[in-house]
Image (cartoon, rainbow, N blue to C red):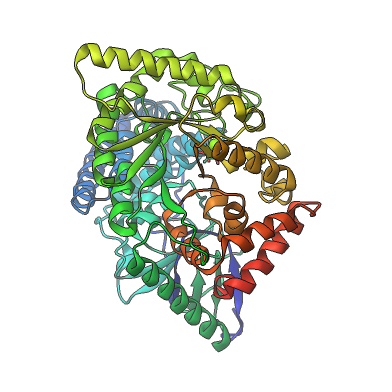
Amino acid sequence: MTSAAMTIKLEGIGVSEGIVIAKCRKKSSNINAILERKILPEEVEYELARLRQSIALSRTQLEDIRENVKANGSGDVSEILEFHIMLLEDEELLTSIENHLRQDLICLEKAIEKACRKAANDMEAMEDPYMQARADDIRDVEKRLLLNLNGVNKNTAPQNAGEPRILLAEDLTPSEAAHIDPRNTLGFITCSGSRTSHTAILARALGIPAIVAVKQSLDEIPDEALIAMDAKQGIAFVNPSQEIVDTLEERRRQRQQLSEMYSTASNRLPETKDGYQTYLVANVELPSEALNVKEKYNVGIGLFRTEFLFIASGHQLTEEEQFNAYRDTVKAVHPYSVIFRTLDIGGDKFMSQLQASREINPFMGTRAIRLSLRLPEMFKTQIRAILRASAFGKVRMMFPMISAVEELTQAMAMVDEVKEELRNEGLPFNEHIDIGCMVEVPSAALVVERLVEYVDFFSIGTNDLVQYSLAVDRANADIAYLYQPAHPAVRRLIKHVTDTAIANGKWVSVCGEMAGDALYTPLLLGMGIQELSMSPVSLAPVHRLISSISRHDAEKLVEAALKCNNGNEVEALCRYFINSNCPELISQ
Ligand code: PEP
Ligand code: MG
């Protein structure tokens, strides 16, 4: 970089929010390029012995870290480390290294590199984003094995040395992230990664602001350059001007105030200015998060995505395993309630143990309730576990991706069958458990008058409702401009479901991302939605917005939106509405 004063803007994906202004430290890779050294056949055994040594050392290190992490209560992190330990025993990987040694007669370093890179590339070529993200784990294990071979890895994290800094790295592997000491590493910025990568999960678990997938090169940024990052927005400035620093500091102060206001208010039932209350609840994936939600945010759980329990464990969970996880969640959230959603495998959440084959169009394929009904034993096992957990607190259960009345009646019949079994076995459960139906498919929204006869509540999954009603793949960045939650077609479906539910005395909530985006809160409230379930970090702004508006004005906004031609026009109206009622929210 020629001028120290030149400001460079970095843009990426914010995966763990927070504002940090600090000098940076660049991560050094520690591994030099590996030369391909030929070996003699008699050297093979010696190289294999070195491999065994490096594996043993790597295992001890990983087990130590895992114990430390467990002691600090981070379940997600210890699962990742468990996966790394499993990779050290992976037969396919070890055979591939041995084959390179015996057949290609190349040195161990090169054999490890080749075998691991092939395995990582194979993972990356998979369609499932979860499996793709596992490629980073293989690279991580490769690096550890190589460093241990060379005696470099002393199980210290180089990024932790010295003064507190923002860490800049081309790539940050999950076990490097697990080593991070938040006292010395104030945030990190990487060129690689995605929202679902383990490194992103770790950033959130550790509470470290993080931006991944930065488009610009980090090569030219010198060590110790000043960086101002706003991870919520996914942007950072190298050598920021005083004006940028002042703006971010002010923003940090406002966000801090907002979250303090929320925690002191500790009110999960915010009220509009004209006295209407709306329930706020959280979306969570794992029991460890559930504990955090109750302690930190004092709310219940409106959507527990049970499929992540299966995906994280990598196997089909037994009844006892599921029961333990559900019961722990119920106890952690007590006295509030938990809505367990039965498995939503399929779409972008692939699990080879449950799905026979890859589909050409998985979002339209054997997903969610369709898969559960096709695998009745698995489905009944899950229903049993959820019902048994209902003996320990307030539990509700709902089915994902219902598209026809028959799917709902078949699922309800299974619930009745399982209840009968439990009664016969003398196992306790809540006989009057509330059962709900997700509305994520337009056909469900349009036959809601029929569905309402069978359920106690509806939960509108806008993530899918938007993609299915507008025919826009929710994960496709190229057509993201067409993905419009405020589109008049979506609004009509939501309104129809809400009106029908309320007219029949049934509860209705929204649990898609739309519920956590304060921009849409007035629209949803104006349509009569009674509960919003969202990622916990969105609770404070949505809470704030609800307290700043009147339901009457929100209804008028819905009326005005009726005249709009597309989602962008509706969004402009919403922005104007928020600016007039709660301007601080827009400025943050
Ligand atoms: C939704 O579709 O809005 C939803 C909450 O389900 P998921 O995001 O898990 O598909
Ligand atoms: Mg969905």
Q: Where is residue 31 in the image (x, y as percent from the top left)?
A: 40, 55
Which residue does the image show at 64% across and 57% down from the upper left? Answer: 555
Res 270 quadrant in image: bottom left
* Residue 215 seen anywhere in this rendered image of the structure: no
- Could you tell me which residue is drawn at 43 percent across and 26 percent down? 103
x then y, percent, for residue 28: 41, 63
Q: Can residue 412 be seen in this view?
A: yes
Please identify the quadrant where the C terminus is shown: bottom right
Q: State the image coordinates of residue 503 (x, y, percent, origin top left).
A: 57, 38
- Identify the residue shown where x is 24% and y is 39%: 328
Indicate left or right for 552 with 511 as reference: right
Q: In the image, is 163 to the left or to the right of 168?
A: left
Q: Where is residue 140 in the image (x, y as percent from the top left)?
A: 39, 47
Q: Which of the image's four quarters has the N terminus? A: bottom right
Which one is nearer the viewer's eye here, 190 or 26?
Answer: 190
Give the residue at x 34% y 32%.
313
Answer above or below: position of 200 versus 426.
Answer: below
Q: Count every numbered label the image shows and give the total.
A: 0
Name the residue nearer the viewer: 224 or 542. Answer: 542
Q: Measured along the vertical axis of the image, is residue 314 above or below residue 580?
A: above
Relative to 557, residue 454 above or below: above
Vertical arrangement, residue 221 with respect to residue 370, above or below: below
Q: Which of 490 and 222 is in front in this view?
A: 490
